[in-house]
């Protein structure tokens, strides 16, 4: 018991230290976003002498964050919807049905996890140019969807395979069809795993920079990472405005994670089958 308690204490201490190390830069960024430029230059590590909320409104206008936010929302949500829908349907097919090429098909998706994403940048650029999708939201939505199908299927297949067959057998006896079983039983029970893949997809799609840089040239279609990079490169004098812009870009990530976090710890299959 003492050994187990000691191990848990050490683990908790290590996690606490790592948490503090990761939180400190974020706290410093947020605090700095409320400072004046003079206060930031003379006292970079201290609290603001005067908390300036106007930094946020100025950064929003100067950096044109409204346009970039909207583009990021369209691309991120569109890619997540496609990835989760296709991934969930494929995972249900692979996890609940047995056929000759099932192992090969599942292995093909797993191999996709080993391919470096950025190694496909040039071929994707050529394909998008030939089909006329450059400088469009689809030029980002489609690659983001393809890149994350592998990890989505990997997570969902492992989760769905743990479901007892009795659930589907009972539904069939009640007259439910294949699609009714998927939408009304399997999908709701998969919510913890769906929350995981949605969070993974959201973080990547929201922060992705290189593909957006290569495939999008129009200013009106640029996503938030591109907009922040341009703003940081052109407005180097205004450090506090950059901090404010970065803080606003971080808010959706934190809010989305907090909204989905409860789903990660809920066991949706508990009590689903009653003797």
Image (spheres, rainbow, N blue to C red):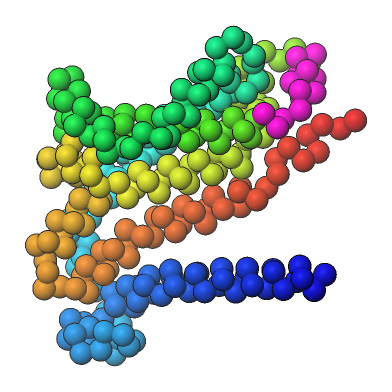
Magenta-colored span: 161-173
Question: Which is nearer the eye, 50 or 11?
Answer: 11
Residue at 36%, 60% in the rendered image: 250
**Residue 42 location in percent, x, y?**
20, 90
Residue furthest out toward the front: 3
**Residue 17 location in percent, x, y?**
52, 74
Q: Is residue 273 visible?
A: yes
187 above or below 173? Answer: below
Q: Main secondary structure of the magenta part?
A: helix
Question: Which is nearer the eye, 30 or 92?
Answer: 92
Image quarter (top left, top right, bottom left or bottom right) of the C terminus: top right
Residue at 41%, 45% in the rendered image: 202
112 above or below 230? Answer: above
Taking the image as shown, residue 258 lies to the left or right of residue 29, namely: right
**Residue 1 location in percent, x, y?**
82, 70
Residue at 15%, 60% in the rendered image: 231
Magenta stretch: residue 164 in it?
yes
Question: Which is nearer the eye, 210 or 104?
Answer: 104
């Amino acid at each position: 018991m003492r050994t187990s308690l000691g191990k848990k204490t050490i683990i908790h201490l290590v996690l606490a230290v790592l948490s503090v190390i990761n939180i400190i830069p974020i706290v410093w960024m947020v605090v700095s976003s409320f400072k004046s430029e003079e206060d930031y230059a003379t006292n970079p590590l201290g609290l603001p002498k005067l908390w300036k909320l106007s930094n946020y409104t100025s950064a929003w206008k100067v950096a044109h964050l409204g346009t970039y936010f909207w583009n990021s929302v369209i691309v991120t949500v569109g890619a997540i919807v496609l990835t989760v829908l296709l991934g969930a349907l494929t995972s249900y097919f692979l996890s609940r049905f047995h056929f000759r090429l099932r192992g090969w098909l599942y292995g093909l998706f797993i191999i996709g996890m080993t391919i470096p994403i950025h190694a496909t940048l040039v071929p994707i650029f050529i394909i998008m140019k030939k089909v006329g999708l450059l400088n469009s939201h689809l030029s980002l939505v489609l690659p983001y969807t393809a890149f994350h199908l592998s990890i989505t299927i990997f997570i969902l297949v492992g989760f769905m395979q743990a479901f007892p067959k009795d659930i589907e057998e009972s539904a069939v006896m009640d007259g439910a069809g294949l699609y009714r079983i998927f939408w009304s039983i399997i999908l709701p029970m998969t919510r913890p795993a769906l929350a995981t893949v949605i969070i993974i997809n959201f973080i990547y799609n929201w922060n992705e920079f290189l593909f957006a840089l290569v495939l999008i040239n129009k200013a009106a279609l640029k996503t938030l990472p591109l907009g922040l990079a341009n703003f940081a490169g052109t407005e180097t004098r205004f450090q506090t405005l950059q901090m404010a812009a970065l803080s606003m870009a971080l808010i959706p990530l934190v809010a989305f994670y907090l909204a989905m976090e409860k789903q990660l710890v809920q066991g949706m299959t508990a009590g689903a089958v009653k003797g």
